[in-house]
Each structure stands twice: as C-alpha cells, then as structure tokens.
Amino acid sequence: MTADLTQASDVTRFRVQLAEQLGWTFDDKDVPQLADVLRRRAQAADLRSGTYLRRLAAGAWDEELTALAEELSINETYFFRHAEQFRALAEVVLPERIRDRAAQRVLSMLSVGCSSGEEAYTMAVVAREALPGPDWIVSVLGLDASAAVLRRAEQARYSGWSLRETPDAVRERWFHPRDGEYELDGRIRADVHFRRYNVAGEDADLWRPGQYDVIFCRNLLMYLTPALQESLVRRMTRSLAGGGYLFLGHTDSLGTRPEGLEPRHSHQTFYYRRSSVRENTAPAPRPGPPAPTAPIPGVPVRPAVRPPEPDLRPERDAPPDPGERATSVLDRAMRLLRDERFAEALTAMEGDRSADPAPAEMLLHAVLLAQAGRLGEAEMECRRLLDADGLNADAHHQLAVCLEGGAAVDVAIGHYRLAAHLDPEFAMPRLRLGLLARRRGENRTAGVELDRALGLLRREREDRLTLFGGGFGRIALTNLCRAELEASGVNR
C-alpha cells in the first residue's frame, strides 16, 4: 500500500513538472503511461524516481526535457494531411497574401509543432504552386520540441506511406525516388528551415509582431495547459501580419469571437484571419454635434405639428404580433418533438409558416424535415439559414446530419468540425465525429472525439438534446458515448 501511494504521488509530481517545464497537460487516463515513462526515464538517468523528479524540478536539464518530448509526443503525420485546409490555403489564403505582398515578393510562414516536417514542406509546396513567378521568396520555419523528429525532417526523405494523400502531379514534380524512398526537390528544401523550440518558453525574435503571413498550429493546443494555450494563441496572433491567417487542428477551437482574429470558413474547414492593421488601429471618431435623427425605414416620420385629437372610438382587436405567433408555433412544435410526435410537430410548423421565419423556426423545420426523410428540403433550409448567418453552429451541425444521411459523409464531417469549432461547448458534433471515426476504423480519432463528447454531454443544453438527440436523452446518449469509447480500445 505504501509503495502504491508513493508511486501515485510521484506520478502526480511528474504531471506537475511536465505542465511547468513543457506546458503539457495529461488526463487521469494517461496515468499508466506516465508511470511507465517516469520509471524508464529515472532508470536511464540511474536515479530513484524521487531524486529524478527533484532534479527535473531544479531546471537546466534540457537534454532530459528533449527526451521527454520525444517519449510523449504523438508524431502521426503525412503530406497534405487534412487536405481541405491546404485547399483553402491554395485557393483563398495565398492569392490574398500574394496580392498584399506584391511589393516585397516574400511569403513568410510558420509551422508550430511540425513533427517530422511533412506539414512544413507541404506549406512550401502549396506556396510554390501558387506563386505568380519564380522571383518570389518563400520562407517556412518549422518548430518542434523533439530533436529526433527534426533530424528526420532535415533529411527530407520519406516513405511512400507518408505521401499517401499527395496528388500524383505534385508527387511527380516535387519528389524524387531515392533508394526506395522519396526525397524532396532541392528548391522546396531550400524554402524550409527547422528549429527546436519548446512552446513553454518565450522568444521575442521568434514572435516579432507582424512577421508571418500564415501560421499552422494543428492539434497541439489540446495537449497544453489552459494558461499556455492562451499565451501561445496571443503570441501567434501578435506575430501574424495584418490580414495573415492562422490554421488550427480540427480538435482545437478559439470560439466565434477570438481577440484580434476573424473566423473564416471555406472548403469544409475553419480557420482565422488576423484583423488588418488599419482595422486594429483606426482612431475612434471625435465627438461632434449630434446628427439629425434619420428616418427609420418602415416607420412614418411624425410631423412637427400639434398631435391629433385622441380617438375615442371603441377599441378593436389589435392584429396578432408576428413575434408572438412565431414563439407560439415554435413552443408547440418543440413540445411535440420532445414527446416524439414528429409528424404532428412538422404539420404544426408547416401549417402556420410565416413568410420570413426566425432562425429558430428554420432550424427546427430543418430538423423535422430530416426526421421525416425529406433530406433535400432539410438541406435547403439549413443552407438558407447559413446564408443569413454563416457562423451558426447549430445550422452547420444539422446540415451535416442531412449530408451524412445522403451519403455525402466527407462533406458532412467538414460541417460537423465547423460546428464544433464555432461552439467548443457543443457536444453533438463531437459525438457524431466520434461515431463516424469508429465506423471508419479510425479508433484514435474516435477516442479523442468521444472523450470530448462525453465531457460536454454533462452540460449540453436541453434544447440541443431535443433537437439533435434523435429521441435519445442525456443518459442514453452518455451511455452510447461510453460504449463506443470502450469499443474503440482507447483507455480512459
């Protein structure tokens, strides 16, 4: 018992040191792995675990921090991973940045947590393909805490498996067969440099304001402590040029109103644009004399004359208030939906539809249409809602439900990811992403998504459970999530 308590105490201290020294955070489900790493690293240093932890806490042990980073990093990557983000980079971001940089003819990009280099090299390839001429300079800097993966990155030689998502034309142009592997073209290698860097440390030169056109930091924030997450996001935002872009991983989100950044979405993916310098620094207007009151469209201007005599005729019934009507119809339909009387709920909505329905009505109508099997109509309703508000997380989720039901699964996944990005507290898209990953045999991804969904389901809003739960309540959805998480083989 004493030995068990001592080991548990050592692992707790180890987690604290990893948070302080590397900024990494670990869940309780990671305790067995951390205990094993602690045992092996202490043995490698020929120290007892307590002595090892005291030395680690003392600092100035860079070689050990490097070893820990290599032990604990997940370095699964390949060229053009999450290709939708690179399509957005090629077709939206780079054309805009090339216009803005036409005078300098220089593009500067950063890959944070670059692992063995595939991401940084992909950024350089996409940039080279987008440039209007050969006289441009492309500079990509890759950062990682692991010296071992950076050594592999600098060799720039990869297996065919690392190129499994690389378009054939790109492979033929920029990769050369060498001894059973593929070596990157020298022009791309010259564009990319690597540097070992621990994101827990500050570096004023690395994060100079306004120096990067594009930053990729994908699937790193989720491993960091909340304080380090906030610090790193601030540094990245500050170091982007006005109009520069930040790409995060699908499991990372800054919400819909991150400071200094504008959410954007295209190509079934989500990313952020740095507010331009002019937008950030425009002075507030100086106060002046009050402006004349402008007429409000649809409201008659009252003439500056004596008010009319009061109308003493008997009162008539006022016309119904459209807002009250909409609320009444919506409330009734939601009650019917909660009682699983789906057909009656749809009839109630369609029997009293206004010419200009509120967003909540449109969303509920789309949900009921989908449940009735009218997926095409439901999809159109969602798209009309998104035309009015492209940042509506619920509409993206329901559109994904329609697309998934219509077998457009890859496009549906993109909209589920958008919904999760737009509202990090939204459990339902995480649950759907986890179930889809399980169906595809992607158990590691399924484990991440289902684990997040499980935590979020505890506080999911009741109206969202009613709308998107398919008749299942919080307990049933939680049990489903737990069962799928266990089936994925991911230890919790």
Image (tube, rainbow, N blue to C red):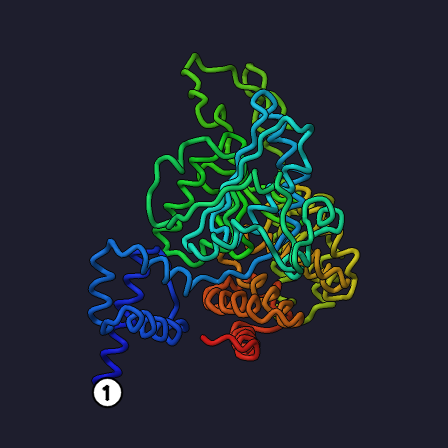
* Depth check, front residue: 377 or 78: 78
Badge 1 amino acid? Met
Residue 312: % across, % down = 59, 32
Question: In this rendering, is residue 421 above or below 299?
Answer: below
Secondary structure type for disc 1: loop
Residue 157: % across, % down = 59, 53
Relative horizontal placement of residue 99, taking residue 172 as reference (left or right): left
Residue at 51% across, 62% down: 461
* Depth check, front residue: 453 or 239: 239
> Which residue is outermost to the front?
179
| Residue 321 seen in the figure | no
Rate crowding at label 1 as few (under 14), some (14 to 19) or many (20 or more) other CA atoms within 10 Å: few
> Which residue is outermost to the bottom?
1
Relative horizontal placement of residue 379, taking residue 360 as reference (left or right): right
> Which residue is outermost to the top?
289
> Where, quadrant-wise, is the C terminus in this rendering?
bottom left
Residue located beneath label 1 in the image:
1
Residue 218: % across, % down = 52, 52
Question: In this rendering, is residue 211 above or below 63?
Answer: above
Question: In this rendering, is residue 137 above or below 328?
Answer: above
